[in-house]
Amino acid sequence: MSGFSSFSGFGGASSGLGTNGFEVSLNYYTGIPDPNVLSNNSLKLIFKSLLKRDEVTREKAIVELLNFIETDSNKSEIINDELLIISWVQLYAKLSIDNSKKIRSTSHQIQSKFVVLLGKKYLKSLRDTIGIWLNGCFDNDRNNSRICIQSLQSAFNDNTEKINNLWEVFAYQIINYSSQIIRFESKDSLSDERIVNKEEAETKFNRILICSIQLLTQIIVKRSGEFKDDSIELLSEILTDEKFQDLIITKEHQLKKNMFVLLKALISFTPDLMNSKIMKLTSKSIIKSIKPSKKSPNESLLFSTIIIPILDSITEFTKFYPKIWEAKKSKENLLDLLSLGSCNSNETYYSSLNLFLNTIADPNNEILMFNFKDFYDKDSQTLINILLKNIDLEKLSAHKIAAISCLFDTLTRFLKLSDNEETKNDIIQFTVKPIVKIIDSPRILQSNSLIQLSTKLNDLKTDDSDVFSEINQDLLNCLPSGPLEIMNTKIINERNFVNHFCSILNASPSLLSAETLESLIQNSIESLDDEQEEYKSPKISIFVLGFILKQNVVRFKDTVLPCIENISNYITKEFTDEPLEIITTFKNSTLSNDNDDILYKIVDASFLKLREIDSPDAFENIIS
């Protein structure tokens, strides 16, 4: 096999990783060391074993090599054996990507030992191996990744500055390592089909490919795009390479995810590199890549790990190169992507989506994807319907809140860009139904979610109308007994709806919201004095009163105290729990401070009322 070592790696298309007159390659058939050149018989046997096909034999041999290097009596021989160093450098390239986790991790530990033993003498060999070594930090096995990082720290005495300097001093070599894998390697060059089956070869290549993409991303981020001319030229060659463009379109989702993370880094840190030629090529690839497969029933699940990186990446591309959306089928593919929703990924999906929509809505962009000045435009309505569908698709409350917040931000854009008052009022009316659906929840929504909704809704208003007033008007019409119906939608969870709506109003900093809440409270109290049909209970008004007490909204103290004094008037055989709950809540609230006389009065009155309706046992809930 050693006869292959004189061949140029990668079919003659690349100079490989070697810079010292001997070949260093990642493939299995070139750059192979000859164990017979080693003078030490133990090392000869070890290196021969490391070239064997049997994995167990290789794992045993690499541990023996580590032990040999760690033995003090061998140090002098190691330092003075140039052929050993050459043999190691050649073999390290192959061992570092072996299918065996044990072999990969131990190879990095051996590399670390060579650096410590040889010091500056190993510098020229470090040029050939730095990419191999740093790539190990991105091993998909967490333990292997940790061991590789520790091997770096051990070699440089935990000196962070020295380790960081590697990314600057050897920038070209690091980029070249990724270049070799992305542009010149394949599953066929890295695995011998006589030993490894097709599936194993594919898995190995994808693992190595993903690591190399992560390595390339890391150096771009670490160097903040500051590279010498040779590195810039090499990066340009990578980006214009057909194989790189094919990787963007890949159907392998983990690979696609890492490609979009890399693309975002390239735009963010190396904008000067992204010339017209590169942008045109990459834009076409991106548009093809973002289209989900309609044939796969699991596409939503498969996209769950990549949907956010895709959105983040295309947002940066849109800012830098709006013409990306001139590509054929760009809008169609984008809408198909957005139709997937968050894919149950993370609520931050909606932050990414909102940022993207904000970017394409920017009037300064040369290309406008959607006409945010026309609420009734076909594409605009398609987008809104997608956002509405997203809300229904979400199961978790926090995700639903994030989804509806994104919808409200989008509606706010339409509202601000529209110059037609009738259209603006239609947008306000349109907003009411989704918010009603959200706050009519069987579960109590978290306060931070309600504050978030309050903030978003505060922007959805015109001179003549706002969402709060629209909901409140229908709510007032249902006082005091209900049934509660908002915009022709029957409310199922009336108590929660009232509490949620009042909380949103109370959280809003606007004067309009404060006035709306005051109106609701005032009307609720006044409605309690209205003559009621005997079989109806004033539950809606009581729910409003309960909110004031639970939230200790002190500014309404003078308004609610007279009503509380008469709470026993509303106790009936069929309506007992809610009024008694008001008494208990009042007892525990700050509004009862310095009002013991009122508390005693309503307790006595309620007890008498309970006796009157033959329900004295219910009184235990108050005194307990």
Image (cartoon, rainbow, N blue to C red):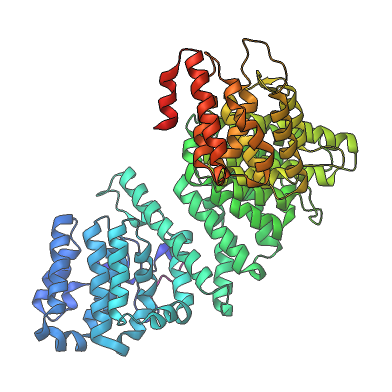
Give the residue drawn at x 31%, y 46%.
200
Q: Quadrant of residue 534?
A: top right
Q: Can residue 445 be seen in this view?
A: no
Question: What is the quadrant of the N terminus in the image?
Answer: bottom left
Q: Over which residues does the magenta segment extend?
A: 14-18
Question: What is the quadrant of the C terminus in the image?
Answer: top left
**16 part of magenta stretch:** yes
In the picture, measured across the screen, residue 282 lies left or right of residue 576, that is right
In the picture, measured across the screen, residue 276 lies left or right of residue 364, that is left
- The vertical placement of 152 against 497, above or below, is below
Q: Quadrant of residue 232?
A: bottom right
Q: Can residue 119 be seen in this view?
A: yes
The residue lying toward the viewer, choosing from 616 and 576, is 616
Secondary structure predominantly adopted by residues drawn in magenta: loop
**475 part of magenta stretch:** no
Q: Quadrant of residue 159?
A: bottom left
Residue 120 in the image, given as x and y percentages of width and height: 32, 89
Give the residue drawn at x 55%, y 32%.
601
Residue 472 in the image, given as x and y percentages of width and height: 73, 31
Residue 611 in the image, given as x and y percentages of width and height: 47, 16
Residue 264 in the image, given as x and y percentages of width and height: 58, 59
In the picture, measured across the screen, residue 209 lies left or right of residue 434, that is left
Give the residue drawn at x 77%, y 48%.
511
The residue lying toward the viewer, choosing from 442 and 518, is 518
- The vertical placement of 482 against 49, above or below, is above
The residue lying toward the viewer, choosing from 240 and 440, is 440
- The vertical placement of 603 against 516, above or below, is above
- The vertical placement of 290 against 538, above or below, is below
The residue lying toward the viewer, choosing from 230 and 564, is 564
